[in-house]
Image (tube, helix red, strand yellow):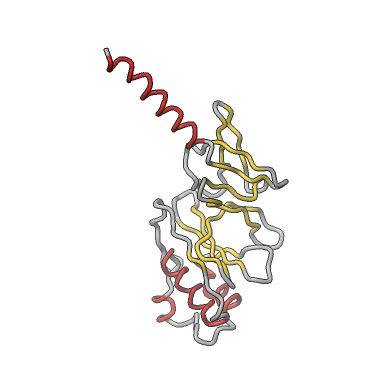
Amino acid sequence: MKHLYLLPLLLLASLSGHAQRTRQDFVVKTNGDTLRGEFRKGFYQPAGQPLTLYQGAVALPFTPGSANSYGDAAGAVVVSRRVGPRGPHVFVRPVGLGYLSLYADTDEQGQSQFYLLRPDSSYVVKIVPASAQLTLNRLMGDCPTLQFGTDETRRRYPISYRGMRALVLAYNACRRPGQPTRVVAPGADWRVERGLSSHA
């Protein structure tokens, strides 16, 4: 008989624990308002897909143009950034934050995409594999130790999570040796890597 009384109490405790967890997810809207709820599909949606915050049975979709950031109890996980001076906003994950900052997202095919934010800029620049050497040389060519046209540099810094992170760390150490770069750990679902050339 004791077990019959304990079962409802355990169920109630588990439900209250679940309710507390769901209230820890949040979205910061572009007007500064913060909404709390639950992300049922995880934080990392493919590029171009709206994010949905659930408040009980109510589903609230957000696009990169309607939200500044979103995250959980640990803080912001994903932020909205404009691509180019007049391009669209996208949801991106911080990878390395410093003098030059690195962000990433995932396209609809599950491939990682990378973006750089210069210190004097209000928008990110997307790294397109076919033109990566030109883009990297334009944004980071003021560091004499980085030679983007060489095979060694392409091997050392492939367009992958590790390669791009290492490149940004090297560039920041070259340009601002006294200013640390904060490296943000990737989510468990980023595992796709691509070389500097246009092939996967």
Vertical position of residue 102 compared to residue 143: above or below: above
141 horizontally vs 11: left or right = right
Looking at the rendered image, the quarter that the N terminus falls into is top left
**Which percent across, then down, holds residue 181?**
52, 71
Furthest toward the front, the residue is 2
Q: Of 65 and 196, which appears nearest the observer?
A: 65
Q: Of 163 and 174, which appears nearest the observer?
A: 174
Looking at the rendered image, the quarter that the C terminus falls into is bottom left
**Which percent across, then down, holds residue 63?**
62, 44
**Which percent across, then down, holds residue 129?**
50, 66
Vertical position of residue 25 compared to residue 98: above or below: above
Furthest toward the top, the residue is 1
Vertical position of residue 136 compared to residue 30: above or below: below
**Which percent across, then down, holds residue 111?**
45, 55
Residue sitting at x 61%, y 50%: 69
Residue sitting at x 50%, y 83%: 146
Residue sitting at x 56%, y 36%: 37
* Residue 85, quarter of picture: bottom right
